[in-house]
Amino acid sequence: MGRLVIVSNRAPSVDGTGDSGGLVVALKDALSEQGGLWIGGAPEQTDTPSASLVFHQRPDFDIALFEMEPELYRDYYLGYSNSVLWPALHGRVDLIDVQPHYSIAYREVARRLARQIADIVTHDDVIWVHDYQLIPLAHELKALGLTSRIGFFLHIPLPDLQTFKAIPDWQDLAGWLADYDLLGLQTQRDLGHLINIFRHTLRGELRANGNMGINGREVVLGCFPISIDVQGFRRLAVEGAAQTAPAPMPRLIGVDRLDYSKGLPHRLLGYEAFLSQNTRFCSNVGLLQIAPPTRDDVDAYKAIRSELEHLAGRINGSFGTIDWTPVQYIHRSLPRDELAVLYRYSQVGLVTPLFDGMNLVAKEYVAAQDEADPGVLILSQFAGAAEEMSDALIVNPHNPQDIADAIRTALEMPLAERRQRHDALYGHLEKHDVGHWSAAFLNRLLSVEQADPEWLARVSGLESRARTG
Ligand code: GDG
């Protein structure tokens, strides 16, 4: 094998700050062993972007940044990626904002990036592309004749066929996905949706080995539930807690980017129902909601922020007293080590997305607990994590009563049951950490046969005819 080449919308920082998030930790070892390279969008846009990748060396792996103009970035990232694909793939077709220039920019970014990548990779390099911002990349790379193996991992959910078809370019998207050699999804749920999309759109045939025959070649499919650095996160929580006092009263915690997919208003409605039905808990429990800003420039995000602030204000106004604030809402990002301690000192973890690829907060909450006196995880049935974490209290986030009941059950749960549930959840996580995830994906990618040159020639021919025609 040549180098491992990771491609994502954003590359890790050149100086290593912010590496503690899961993905860099997961891929660091594989990258440094293989002499790897991480290609990603430059953190700042420029009116005079370089026509080739801009290289930086880190001690562990190299970084190559892809530059773009501010307008192109806006239409590709805030536009197509986050105003079309993100809502559609999360089942919120009502929020899709279709603009022709968004989809032009999305394709243009993949085309330009492919040219820059094709200049520097060789046949033996293995390319792993991440997430919905870059779906057309394999198509563009193969059109340039690249024969390296190319895998793709979708971090967010893939909806059912009918929802998928609400995206104006759904047929193109299906075709671009089928150009990868390996497609990895978070859950069996999403894998089922992908198979159905391929069957319907490309007459794909499911083979006995679970892969799909599409246009005379085999696309390898797999379910790879992402995870966290379990030991590392647990260590942060234990060490931090040794220097911090516990919370003065039982606490529920929620930690989510302020995104409409995370079900924050639904969560507050559930908490409101809980307080109104269980008044003995008033003044004796608190909800801490950390919701750092994200994609502020997209209208749907402004709307969710004001909805959340309205609800938090309503609950505090109705139930709060001079000495007690029922909802503590923080609209800022906190350092990761502080988060770990907050999780450990919270008796209930509330993870109630309406639709989520995986949800790492659920896993972080479990990893941070004290096994002798663990808290209880309340988890939405629509988080990908629910497939693996059935020992959490599983709820339907659309039903406030379900959330209210689960909060009461969690707060009243006897120690023995809390320990039993936590042991099962932690036991699974320990064996399925983020290293397990990246190794499983990479091993599968390495076992894929390299592209058939005849097929490639055909695709490249069609592509160049389409361009010149
Ligand atoms: C996408 C998919 C999939 C949050 N607030 C703070 C903070 N965070 C960290 C959490 C966690 C991460 O952000 C959020 O991860 P999630 O998995 O919950 O969600 P997305 O950001 O939507 O991620 C998701 C994931 O990709 C991985 O494949 O699981 O389904 O949507 O790590 O801790 N971190 C810090 N301060 C904060 O205030 N430091």
Image: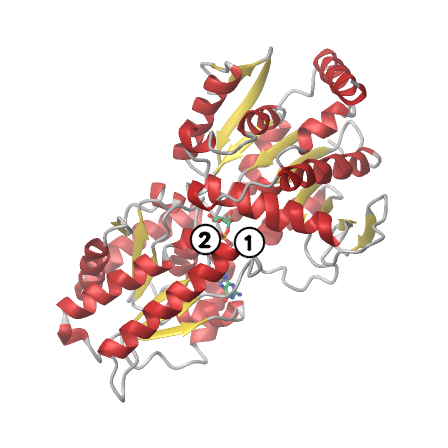
The residue at 53%/44% (across/down) is 97
CB under 8 Å between discs 1 and 2: yes
The residue at 60%/43% (across/down) is 80
For ligand 1, tell me if the residue under mark 1 lies within 8 Å. yes
Q: Is residue 376 left or right of residue 97?
A: left
Query: Gap in Å between the C-alphas at discs 1 and 2?
Result: 9 Å
**Lower sequence index among marks 1 and 2:** 1
Instruction: Name the amino acid type tagged 1.
Output: Gly
Q: Quadrant of the N terminus?
A: top right
Characterize the local packing of mark 1: few (<14), some (14-19) or many (20 or more) Cα atoms within 10 angstroms: some
The residue at 32%/50% (across/down) is 380
Residue to which mark 2 is pinned = 360
Instruction: Name the amino acid type tagged 2.
Output: Leu
Q: Is residue 368 visible?
A: yes
Q: Nearer the viewer, residue 249 or 156?
A: 156
Residue ranking furthest to the bottom: 322
Q: Nearer the viewer, residue 303 or 148?
A: 303
Q: Is residue 244 left or right of residue 83?
A: left
Residue to which mark 1 is pinned = 22
Q: Is residue 8 left or right of residue 46?
A: left
The residue at 70%/59% (across/down) is 13
